[in-house]
Image (cartoon, helix red, strand yellow):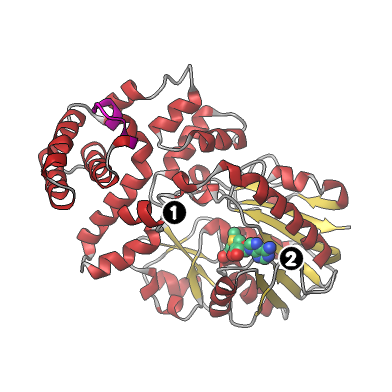
Amino acid sequence: MRAVDERDAYANLLMPSLLRQRRLSGRDAALATELAYGTLRGLGTYDEIIAACSDRPPEQVDPPLLDAIRLGVHQLLKTRIPPHAAVSATIDLVRLRVGTGPSRYANAVLRKVAGRTLEEWLAIVAPPREEDPVGHLSVSHSHPRWIVSALRDALGGDVDETAALLAADNDRPRVALVARPGRCSVEELVEAGGERARYSPYGVYLPEGDPGSLRAVGEARAAVQDEASQLVALALTRVPLDADGRWLDMCAGPGGKAGLLDAIAVQGGGHLLAADAQYHRARLVWSTTKDAEVVVADGTEPPWRAGAFDRVMLDAPCTGLGALRRRPEARWRRDPRSIPELTSLQRRLLDSALEAVRPGGVVAYVTCSPHLAETRAVVDDVRDRVEMLDAREFLPEVPDLGDGPYAQFWPHRHGTDAMFVALMRRR
Ligand SMILES: C[S@@+](CC[C@H](N)C(=O)[O-])C[C@H]1O[C@@H](n2cnc3c(N)ncnc32)[C@H](O)[C@@H]1O
């Protein structure tokens, strides 16, 4: 938590190496991970409760002390750890890492917090739902206000459904794997302990264990990949074309969709070119694909000829509001001020994707964000230049993808990231 605060570390990347360093495994590792991720997700709620139990607002509390108290609050209100153990472990931590004086403050705050349940605290600290639904959801589900507002808009204003989505964001996502066709079979992953996925014909859930230890994953024949990510790539490949074989993934790093597109392209005798603007991201694509050609290229100033491709995947850089459940601290880092710059880049990339595809060819515009400014608003702008296809028709196995012609996945409906896809044919 200190690394996340002090040096903008990504908890999900740092945690595995910390666990190895401290030699934690099995249930201890699971508990340490739950405490760190759960506290990072919940700190919007916890800070409101801490403020109600203290004479100082949280922003005036020394950050290491505040983090320790948040960790204590999480244990008290969200876990089955006995209250006396949660308080004494937190006090010991503060004494050891911050000082004796602060430990008295932590003790006083935590004893007050322990006097009520989470529901009782929420009734006190969250604004009433009828008066301020966004504020209520923001505090009770620990998401910044602007994100609650954007997600509610994307769900057509439905407050109950927004609450279900926010709750799903706070759940740990299950690990999904993709068996890259022609390279690995779903059966092989099921034999290794997986369960067949609900929607994706290539998907397998891994209920427990380290996916990195599976042979197929080590050999890049399979990979960890959200089921919606698999399905949007698959939808692009399912659109019928008269001539086919030259595929482009314009924003390919780190290579999840490229890995699947590469495998499918080769099966049909085709070929994938995968590009990313960043060298290190392109290297990741190179190491996870087998037959694709990989280039470092800016999609807005492309090195390829106009009209050179039959199918183009544009998985655009976005706010990532659809994948908040994967990155515990992400919701506090995103900044709504980044949206205009992102949507302008998304528009330029979409123009370029429509140039790259030949007349009659197909483009998939994908984001792992359901924010309307990044999804509908971007593709609505090109509607008169393309034949917009109904993306849902190419995902017949998945229900509840919205009113069309676009398809929107949701964590609370599908158990996937909130991935958006629009499919369009160039006139
Ligand atoms: C959402 S990620 C793509 C995820 C990827 N398709 C996958 O499935 O693993 C967006 C990527 O776009 C790249 N990017 C950003 N601006 C770009 C540009 N102008 N041209 C090409 N790639 C760009 C970023 O480096 C990032 O890797």
Magenta part of the protein: which range? 50-59
- Out of 426 and 294, give the one closest to the viewer: 294
Q: Which residue is mark 2?
A: 312
Q: Which residue is mark 1?
A: 326
Ligand 1 rendered quadrant: bottom right
Where residue 283 sits in the image (x, y, percent)?
56, 77
- Out of 249 and 298, give the one closest to the viewer: 298
Q: Residue at x 54, y 76 (%)?
A: 288
Query: Secondary structure under badge 1?
Result: loop
Query: Is label 1 within 8 A of ligand 1 (CB to nearest ligand atom)?
Result: no
Q: Amino acid at mark 1?
A: Arg
Query: In the rendered view of the protein, which quadrant contains the C terminus?
Result: bottom right
Where residue 220 sits in the image (x, y, percent)?
50, 78
What is the crowding at mark 2: few (fewer than 14 residues within 10 Å), some, or many (at least 20)?
many
Query: Secondary structure under badge 2?
Result: strand
- Out of 65 and 339, give the one closest to the viewer: 65
Position of 308 with respect to 337 (left or right) is right
Compared to residue 122, the image places residue 193 above or below, namely below
Q: Residue at x 43, y 71 (%)?
A: 189
Compared to residue 76, the image places residue 242 above or below, namely below
Let me know if residue 266 appears in the view.
Answer: yes
What is the crowding at mark 1: few (fewer than 14 residues within 10 Å), some, or many (at least 20)?
some
Q: Are marks 2 and 1 in contact (CB under 8 Å)?
A: no
* Precedes in sequence: disc 2 or disc 1: 2
User: Residue 123's image quarter?
Assistant: top left
Position of 172 with respect to 422 (left or right) is left
Let me know if residue 405 appears in the view.
Answer: no
Q: Amino acid at mark 2?
A: Val
Where residue 312 sits in the image (x, y, percent)?
74, 65
Q: Residue at x 39, y 72 (%)?
A: 212
User: Residue 41's image quarter?
Assistant: top left
Position of 116 with respect to 277 (left or right) is left
